[in-house]
Image (cartoon, rainbow, N blue to C red):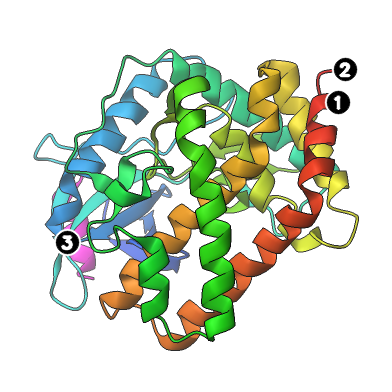
Amino acid sequence: MDVSAICATWPIQGPCSLTPLTGGTNNHVWRVDTADGHAYTLRVSSGETHLPRLRYEMTILQALSIQDLPFLLPLPIHAYSGDQLVPLEIQDGTIGIATLAPFLPGSVSRKSTPEKASAAGRTLAILDQALASVPDQSTPQEISILLPFGRLEMRNPQVPDVGKALELLPLERQQVRKMQDVLEDHLDGVEKLYDSLPQQLLHRDLDTSNVLLDEQEGVTAVLDFEFAARDIRVLDLSVSLSWWPVSRMGTGAEWEIIDPLGRSYMDMLHLEEAELRAIPTMMRMRQFASLQHRIGRYLSGLEADAAIQDNIEFALWRLDWLASQQETLIEHALHWRD
């Protein structure tokens, strides 16, 4: 990365320094520190094909920025060109689409606690209420990754049939058959949920890495609206319930995280009984959407055999937990209304 190009692109005080940060599957991320003591987050998405998705993301962030939210958002500043999205050369010579946003206070939680889970649940409910009031942001059809998680046949043209694609992976036959069976059972009930449950604009990825917290102030910021799109409303809560207790799943202590998160969400945003009963299905829905994405990367040569094998094993472990705990999870969810 050419550091001088950053100061030449955005109205910031050079010279500046770069520190690599943890990025997502599709992004490179750095902290930028400037000569006048300010700090920014530089995010570069590989390839200009991501531009329509990023434009959609910027539209949502802009709409949220005018609401009185009790946490910050990663709203990019405008470059000298007047745009928030600009082409920038990455170290390997390829061109990516870059944004530069103020570096937000707080840190990612390395360990889920009941208190942090409760704060996350409250934050997610506030965010979902705000997203529901955003003017309709119809997802352009060409951005398949932003289509509903349940529409697997449409989301990834390279992997329209996840069941068949599983047979192309370096897996044991027993693993493939087990995953296919779970997927088949799951898909049988998905269409009915899209016909019957409320839908709205959602974040769809509020795991522990996308919430910044401060020990005294609680949640300071919500990050990464890369997957924000319209979907079944209870999906947002279900995604968080998939990730915040993940290190405790199968120990019996997962409920110490699940219940505070779910109850705090319900205190702010009431969900219908049918939505609460759908949470296990929504958790499977998110898992299969993630798996489809990983399979696509593997088939494109972007993921090694060991990585896809680890991903399948993790997915099977989570699906096993859901199979054994589904009724208990629904019972707990129904008690969040008390």
Kindly state the secondary structure of the residue where label 1 is placed: helix
Q: Residue furthest left?
A: 81
Give yes or no for residue 9 being in the magenta stretch.
yes
The numbered disc on residue 338 is 2
For residue 171, side relative to residue 51 (left or right): right
Quarter of the image where the C terminus is located:
top right
Identified by mark 1, the residue type is His
Provide residue 306's location: percent of width, then percent of height. Answer: 49, 87
SS state under label 2: loop
**Numbered disc total:** 3
Residue at (69% x, 17% y) in the render: 268
Q: Is residue 262 above or below residue 1?
A: above
Q: What distance separates the C-alpha of mark 1 from that of mark 2?
A: 5 Å
Under tag 3, what secondary structure? loop
x and y, in percent, of residue 7 in the image:
20, 54
> Which residue is more in the foreground, 39 or 36?
39
Q: What's the mark number on residue 47?
A: 3
User: Which comes before the other along the chain, label 1 or label 3?
Assistant: 3
